[in-house]
C-alpha cells in the first residue's frame, strides 16, 4: 500500500510517499479502505517539519479519513460500511489517513450519517466538524440570526470557509475577514461582506459590531474580535494560524459581558454523533459536494508547501482510487 509516512528527521520529522505493508499499520479492530482524506494546516506542519506535532515515529500523516470498512472485528461495523474517522491522535501518534489503508479501534469510528455522501462528509471533515461545534456552542449560549451580524476570521481557510457557509445556511448575516483579495469566493459561500485584515490598535474596546464571532486564526485577529463584539456576544476560538499569544484586557468581559469559548474538535463520541447529525441536516452547507478540490497522494507534498505559504483557499482532499 502507498502512504505518506513521516520519519524522524532532526527535531520535527519529515514525510515522504512510501510503499509499506498494511500489516505494519498500528493495531485496531477496524480496517478501512481510505477513499478521501482532508488536508489540514496541522497536517502540513507535521508533514513538512513546521512544528513539533508528531509524537511517535514513523507515523502515517493525516488527521482524518472517510472510507469503507474492509475488515472488522467490531460487530458495529460490517465490511462495506462507509465510516468517518478524525482526531484520536491519528496522524500524530497513530497511523493516519494519508494512506490507502487505515486501521483503528472501533471506538474511534463514526458511521457515515444519513444525508451525507462520502464526498460531502470528507469535504466537511475535521474543519467542518470544528466549525459546526462552534456554531452549536454559540447557539447554545443564546446566539440567534436576529441578534446581529457574525464575523468569521481566517475565512478563506477550511474551517473559516465552512463556518461562513454554515452560518449563511442558518440565516446569519456573515462578515468574513481575510488577508486574501476578495475574488468572490466568500460571497459565493454566503458572506454579506468581506473585510480586509483590521489595522493594529491599542484601544481596549472599539465600536461594538458583532453578535458573535468564529475565530480560526488566533493572535491579533482574536484580540480585535473581542474588542469589537457587542454586549452579551460570544466568540468561539478554534485556530492559531495567526499566532498563539492573546494580548487583551478584561474590559470586553466586564463591560460588555462578552464570552470567549474554546473549541476542541477531539470531542467524545456522543457529541460527535450529535454534531455530525446536524452536519447532515440544518448545518449542511449548500453545494457542499462541489466545494472541495481533489488531489492525488503524489501531489500532497507540494500542496502542503503551498498551504504553509498561505496560498490555499477552501478545502482540499487527497482522493484514493475506489476499492
Image: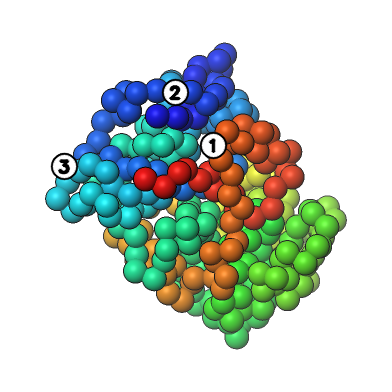
Q: Which residue is mark 1?
A: 297
For the point 41% across and 37% down, the residue is 100
Give the distance between the C-alpha atoms of the residues marked 2 and 3, in whole angstroms: 26 Å
Residue 260 at least partly seen: no
The N terminus - image quarter: top left
For the point 73% across and 43% down, the residue is 310
Give the distance between the C-alpha atoms of the residues marked 1 and 2, in whole angstroms: 12 Å
31 or 246: nearer the eye? Answer: 31
Mark 3 lies on a secondary structure that is loop
Residue 279's x, y, as percent?
44, 67
| Badge nearest the viewer, 3 or 1 | 1
Sort mark 2 into few (<14), some (14-19) or many (20+) by Cα contacts within 10 Å. few
| Mark toward the start of the polypeptide (2 vs 3) | 2
Q: Which residue is mark 2?
A: 19
Q: Which residue is mark 3?
A: 73
* Label 2 with label 3: CB-CB less than 8 Å: no
| Mark toward the start of the polypeptide (1 vs 2) | 2
Mark 2 lies on a secondary structure that is strand
Which residue is outermost to the top? 10
Amino acid at each position: 500500500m502507498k502512504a505518506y509516512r513521516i520519519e524522524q528527521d532532526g527535531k520535527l520529522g519529515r514525510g515522504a510517499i512510501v510503499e509499506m505493508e498494511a500489516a505494519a499499520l498500528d493495531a485496531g479492530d477496524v480496517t478501512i479502505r481510505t477513499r478521501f482524506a482532508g488536508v489540514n494546516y496541522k497536517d502540513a506542519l507535521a508533514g513538512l517539519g513546521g512544528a513539533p506535532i508528531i509524537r511517535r515515529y514513523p507515523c502515517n500523516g493525516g488527521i482524518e479519513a472517510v472510507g469503507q470498512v474492509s475488515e472488522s472485528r467490531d460487530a458495529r461495523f460490517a465490511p462495506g460500511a462507509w465510516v468517518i474517522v478524525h482526531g484520536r491522535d491519528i496522524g500524530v501518534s497513530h497511523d493516519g489517513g494519508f494512506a490507502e489503508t487505515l486501521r483503528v479501534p472501533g471506538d474511534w469510528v463514526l458511521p457515515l450519517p444519513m444525508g451525507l455522501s462520502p464526498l460531502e462528509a470528507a469535504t466537511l471533515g475535521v474543519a467542518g466538524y470544528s466549525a459546526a461545534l462552534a456554531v452549536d456552542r454559540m447557539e447554545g449560549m443564546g446566539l440567534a440570526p436576529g441578534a446581529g451580524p457574525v464575523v468569521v476570521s481566517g475565512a478563506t481557510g477550511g474551517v473559516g470557509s465552512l463556518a461562513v457557509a454554515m452560518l449563511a445556511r442558518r440565516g446569519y448575516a456573515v462578515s468574513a475577514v481575510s488577508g486574501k483579495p476578495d475574488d468572490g469566493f466568500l460571497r459565493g459561500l454566503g458572506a454579506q461582506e468581506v473585510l480586509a485584515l483590521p489595522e493594529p490598535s491599542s484601544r481596549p474596546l472599539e465600536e461594538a459590531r458583532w453578535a458573535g464571532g468564529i475565530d480560526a486564526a488566533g493572535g491579533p485577529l482574536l484580540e480585535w474580535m473581542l474588542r469589537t463584539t457587542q454586549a452579551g456576544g460570544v466568540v468561539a476560538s478554534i485556530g492559531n494560524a495567526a499566532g498563539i499569544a492573546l494580548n487583551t484586557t478584561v474590559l470586553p468581559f466586564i463591560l460588555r459581558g462578552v464570552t470567549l469559548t474554546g473549541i476542541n474538535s477531539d470531542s467524545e463520541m456522543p457529541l460527535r454523533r450529535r454534531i455530525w447529525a446536524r452536519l447532515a441536516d440544518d448545518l449542511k452547507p449548500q453545494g457542499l459536494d462541489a466545494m472541495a478540490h481533489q488531489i492525488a497522494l503524489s501531489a500532497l507534498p507540494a500542496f502542503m508547501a503551498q498551504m504553509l505559504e498561505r496560498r490555499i483557499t477552501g478545502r482540499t482532499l487527497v482522493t484514493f482510487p475506489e476499492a
